[in-house]
Amino acid sequence: MSDLLGITLSARYRLEERIGAGGMSTVYRAVDETLQRSVAVKVMNREVADDSDQLERFRREARAVAQLSHPNVVGVIDAGEDSGHPYIVFEFIEGETLKQRVRRLGRLPIPEAVAYAIEIARALGAAHDHLIVHRDVKPQNVLIDLEGTAKVTDFGIARSLEEEGLTDDGRVLGTTDYVSPEQALGQSVTGQSDLYSLGVVLYEMLTGELPFSAETQVGVAMKHVREELPDVRSKRPEASAALAAIVDTATAKRVEDRYADDQELIADLEALLALEAQRAGSVTGEATIVMNSLPRRTRRRVPLAIRHRGTVGLAGIVMLLALIGIGIWLGSRAHSGADLPGKGGQAKLVVLCRRCATAYNPDGIGGTEQNNNQARLAIDGKPNTSWPTQTYYTGQLGKAGVGIYVAHTRGTSASAIVIDTVTPGFEATIYGSNQQPSATNFAGSGWQRLSTSQRVVSGREIRLTGGGRKYSYFLTWITKLPHGGDYAAVNEIKLYR
Ligand code: 3AM
């Protein structure tokens, strides 16, 4: 397509330099002769311009992005067609792609990585608000301008959820390095698929590596379907448990276990940025700017020294107090780091993804749901919220049991479990399994008994047997309601390694 160099499209955009090429199009730096400024012009390749489906897709990109006016989205300025060349004009971003930045610097400083993740999530949030799914979130599509701001581009295969009817021609993606399991399997793709890809981008910013490699792109895609991402902390030990939990929740294989929407992910990332800035002792570059854009409530948690100056000089006491404050607050949200009392500080709390709790009623009696929509309250780190069983007015369960299980994506060995409850005295047994529990068949779910049956005392440790075997599912199986009570509540389930 170098034949286009030097020509002026629609008597306005003079193509000066070829800056990138993809399968469908070529990107040029151009001069807008009317406004005398640099622009980026994406010209559709001639071969594909003859294909009406592809042409429609190209036009759709222009229309989709034109709807968005967001500081973290590369803006569309114009679109047109000249001598059979459809083109889109974008604001020109001087700088580099996020991919180039990671290649150049390797692992990014943690506050910077989190700041970029926030900016990308905000851009995706704006798109999702317009029912546009990006579908190709990767660091190659994130431009970092000279001020350090991240801007998402290339909505080339984005689709409006309202246009689901349009046939998807199964176009081969350039890379499957960031593909969500459902997308790899050709299932329906939603905003949560973009969040998965963003989770992988965050993983890469933190570790400097991709989570999966294989001989072929299909091989990588299959790993996204089948294999858990490696633990971020095995590659980046200074990453906090809370940060690892965010990566885990964003990249959960099952959509139900993933962040439900952008706002949930952004809230966790913003809270974390405040903490990570604190851990790093100073913030620079984009982290400072993003920090200044945090909602007031979150920003108040950032120590004054960082909030105002971007670096920490003095104010040691203020900082220390704030550090303790944030530690407690975030720890209570993400289960970071606390030790089990009475175990000599050796047992470590297992970090659970925030959607990884499920109510369990395989007998089906008394309503199959069993308040499953509240299950996550048992692992939200807040002792005053709980998952309750349904109410059994007779005071009897009338079946073998009912319960709640938590999932640990990679599987973990646990030595103890602690249940906080406002309805102590119910009887429960802890089980472990490595197969996805059947919603209707207790016996067919592979449960191994890990504890004796016991009356639950709030906050008291229940020892688990199992010889250090790893399990992916841990079930608290309630066999008897508390004496005189008609339900049982689980305020918190804490699993210790
Ligand atoms: O091929 P590289 O990675 O050097 O940075 C983008 C990428 O560069 C650049 O075009 C290439 C293919 O996407 N690019 C895309 N949109 C751009 C824009 N709006 C842009 N460069 C500047 N401004």
Image: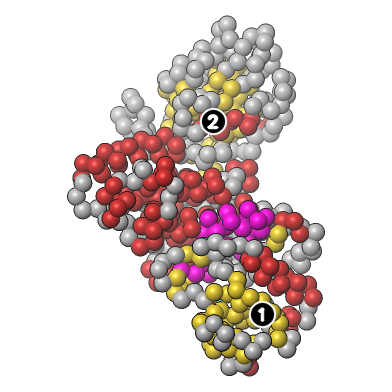
Compare marks 2 and 1 and give the one earlier in the sequence: 1
Instruction: Check the image and report above or below for 422 versus 39.
Output: above
Q: Which residue is mark 2?
A: 377
Q: Residue at x 69, y 13 (%)?
A: 398
In the image, which residues are magenta? 120-144
Give 438 or 43, whichever is nearer the viewer: 43
- Residue 192 spot, x, y in % from top left: 62, 51
Q: Are marks 2 and 1 in contact (CB under 8 Å)?
A: no
Can residue 234 be seen in this snapshot? no
Q: Helix or strand or loop: what does disc 2 sit on?
A: helix
Asked whether 368 falls inside the magenta stretch, the response is no
| Amino acid type, mark 1 | Tyr
Q: Which residue is mark 1?
A: 87
Can residue 167 be seen in this snapshot? yes
- Residue 106 spot, x, y in % from top left: 39, 66
Other residues around mark 1 within 10 Å, as few (<14) / some (14–19) / many (≥20):
many
Q: Residue at x 49, y 20 (%)?
A: 421
- Residue 6 spot, x, y in % from top left: 58, 93
